[in-house]
Amino acid sequence: MVRGRKTSGIFSSLIFLFMVIVSASFLWAALPSVKFGIKAGGGLANIFGQDTFDQKWQESLACGIFLDLTIYQKFRAGTEVIFFRKGSIYRLNVNQIEYREKLILDYLEIPVFLKLYFFESSRYRFYLYGGPSAGFNLKARLKVTFDGLEESVEVDNLKGTDYLINAGTGAELKLKSGFIVFELRYNYGLKSISTETEGDVRNKSIVLLAGYRF
């Protein structure tokens, strides 16, 4: 399990987020085929790999903005700037007293998707999608609880960047001025997030998202 203190690049990540939002605003205004939206949701997250020890799933949440671009008939390309909270839980009973470690990982993720619309009607559209993403570590901490006492420590042995693959399915409900969007997404880490040379600790999550596309 990862332990220690953490040094975060929050300031640089916020600057990057600002630049992405400004660039997206100009792009949205310039290209009528580009659609802008917001989404949020939650689900379950965990870590896995050779250096994890019987980790359990814990609650996850996500929220952010997205852009969609029509590229050819049933195909659309998309990208997002989305905040993800991930992590895991480790539990151990010591003399009938529970010892618990809750790892909380906050990321700013930027995925790139290709969407295939396989069914469309006058009001509904269904699609499959997938693609890679990069996640930037905003904050990592470990909450330890034992015998009624709780301590929180920062984690500093994690990389600043995570690389993942995403896959999922979604549905759109057409309204007068836009679409309500629902998505189910699985998120799988491709590389270890541990800074140790031989370390193997990776992220995974499954989330249900809802949003609105203008």
Image (spheres, helix red, strand yellow):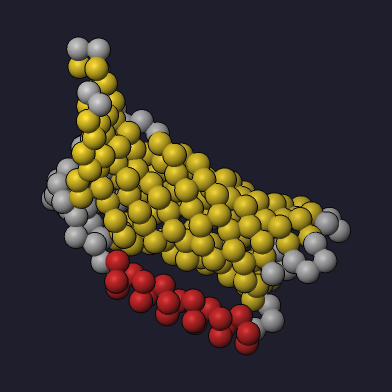
Front-most of residues 178 and 120: 178
Name which residue lies at 57% across and 45% down. Answer: 208
Name which residue lies at 19% across and 55% down. Answer: 6
Name which residue lies at 33% across and 70% down. Answer: 13
The image quarter containing residue 50 is: top left
Name which residue lies at 42% across and 80% down. Answer: 19
From the top left corner, tell me how far across and down residue 152 is, in percent.
22, 43
The image quarter containing residue 101 is: top left
Q: Is residue 55 left or right of residue 41?
A: left
Asked if residue 130 is positioned above or below residue 70 in the image, the reply reads above
Asked if residue 132 is positioned above or below residue 45 in the image, the reply reads below
From the top left corner, tell me how far across and down residue 178 is, in percent.
75, 66
Q: Is residue 194 left or right of residue 103?
A: left
Front-most of residues 132 and 26: 26
From the top left corner, tell me how far across and down residue 71 is, in percent.
65, 73
Q: Is residue 169 left or right of residue 193?
A: right
Residue 54 is at least partly visible in this image? yes
Front-most of residues 161 and 4: 4
Q: Is residue 206 left or right of residue 116?
A: left
Asked if residue 83 is positioned above or below residue 147 in the image, the reply reads below
The image quarter containing residue 124 is: bottom right
